[in-house]
Amino acid sequence: MTQQYLVGELSELISLLEPAAGEGLVESVRALRRLVECSPVAALAPLAVEATTIADVICWATLDRGDAAEFARESAAAAQLHEFAVSANLLP
């Protein structure tokens, strides 16, 4: 995989997380995405860990709200993010 592909794909998958506006995570997702786009490939592993952690928090918050449709969308995005990060050797 090329370096640009890794950065671009990780950034795109992070953008799919889209937490609900009231959760306070919107800015965290945006900031993480900007950081990924400005980081060298060597720095992506800890950012991928952070992204999967944020995805987990987003999914739990949605479950707490009882929004099954939104949870299905968010969990699918989280699964894609995790699968990519493992395939790219960004997660153990």
Image: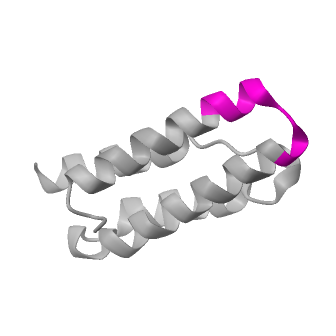
Range drawn in magenta: 64-73
Q: Position of residue 37 (x, y in %)?
A: 38, 59
Judge whether residue 72 is colored magenta.
yes
Q: Is residue 34 above or below residue 17?
A: below
Left or right: 62 as drawn, with respect to 47: right
Left or right: 3 as drawn, with respect to 51: left
| Residue depicted at 81% across the width and 60% down the height | 24
Q: Position of residue 91 (x, y in %)?
A: 31, 65
Left or right: 40 as drawn, with respect to 36: left
The answer to which image quadrant residue 47 occupies is bottom left
Choose between 4 and 71: the one closer to the eye.
71
| Residue depicted at 33% across the width and 45% down the height | 83
Judge whether residue 75 is colored magenta.
no
Q: Position of residue 41 (x, y in %)?
A: 22, 67
Dominant SS of magenta comes to helix
Q: Position of residue 51 (x, y in %)?
A: 50, 60
Q: Is residue 18 above or below residue 52?
A: above
